[in-house]
Amino acid sequence: MFVIDIYQHFRNEEQELIDQLMDKCEQADSHYAPVLTAFLDPRGQYILEVIVGSYEDLNVTYNGGPHAERKRAIIAPSYYEPQEEDYEISLLQIDYPEKFVNIQHQHVLGTLMSLGIERDQLGDIMIGDEIQFILTKRLESYIMFELTRIKGATVKLNSIPIKDMIQSEENWKIQSATVSALRLDVVLKDMIRKSRNIAKQLIEKKRVKVNHTIVDTPDFQLEKNDLLSIQGFGRAQITEIGGRTKKDKLHITYQTLFK
């Protein structure tokens, strides 16, 4: 019965993730022992909390480093107190010739993906005075050996303590709006300050991702914590969905990181 109920709360596209997380919870519950997940974005963390909430004696804790958005979770019985090393995460810092190359978030992500890394094995990528990224510990030696160039420049990786993780200096801009619906084309139009027709074209041409997955249907329903990647613009995230206005429009808050 719970399985049917949980699916009703979320999207069809999220069923695979729900099944994976439910399986992890079942393992923790039946073996009465901690279970570690891959990295989850804020939406995935929210889904996991809803699932864990249906178990009497399970708790969930997260770690992806200080200030992290993407985190690994430990699902465990209430007796268990996780330590930092239990999350099995590594922090790598990139040494590169700063005078000759400008490395951005997308360059690091693209290079890691080209080495065959699954997105859920990678945590946050931090861009500031230093460039760092978090990943699952088991991939550390492989990446340190294989990742030697980014954007044509020779780079070197150093493994450093998690406590030395920087806060990304990317400047997200917080915006508020009222929208007639949470349809992707309606919200996207407001975010990019263009016509609904242009928003629709971007979606149908597969230039918009929601939570790292291409969505090409304009009527896709957005929810809190959804992260949008919009080709040619940058990233945006819905941070709050509020009440309705007298004209039946929805108050939303979102943040953008546009070029």
Image (spheres, rainbow, N blue to C red):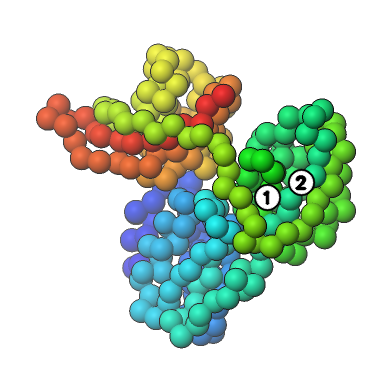
* Residue 73 visible here: yes
SS for callout 2? strand
Tell which residue pokes out farthest to the left in this image: 246
The residue tagged 2 is 94
Circle 2 residues within 10 Å: few <14, some 14–19, many ≥20: some
Horizontal placement of 202 versus 114: left or right?
A: left
Q: Position of residue 257 (x, y in %)?
A: 51, 31
Query: Mark 1 near mark 2, Cβ–Cβ under 8 Å?
Result: yes
In the image, is residue 183 above or below residue 85?
above
Q: Quadrant of the N terminus?
A: bottom left
* Residue 120 visible here: no
Q: Position of residue 118 (x, y in %)?
A: 69, 51
Type of amino acid under label 2: Ile
Residue at x-position 43% and y-position 57%: 47
Residue at x-position 82% and y-position 35%: 97
Type of amino acid under label 1: Phe
Q: Position of residue 76 (x, y in %)?
A: 49, 77
Horizontal placement of 102 versus 207: left or right?
A: right
SS for callout 1? strand
Q: Quadrant of residue 220?
A: top left
Residue at x-position 38% and y-position 62%: 50
Q: Nearer the viewer, residue 130 or 78?
A: 130
Q: Position of residue 254 (x, y in %)?
A: 38, 35
Residue at x-position 26% and y-position 28%: 178
Q: CA distance from mark 1 to mark 2?
A: 8 Å
Q: Quadrant of residue 65?
A: bottom right
**Numbered tag placed on residue 15 in the rendering:** none
Q: Nearer the viewer, residue 35 or 21?
A: 35
Circle 1 residues within 10 Å: few <14, some 14–19, many ≥20: many
Q: Nearer the viewer, residue 153 or 97?
A: 97
Sequence-wise first label, 1 or 2: 2
**Numbered tag placed on residue 133 in the rendering:** 1
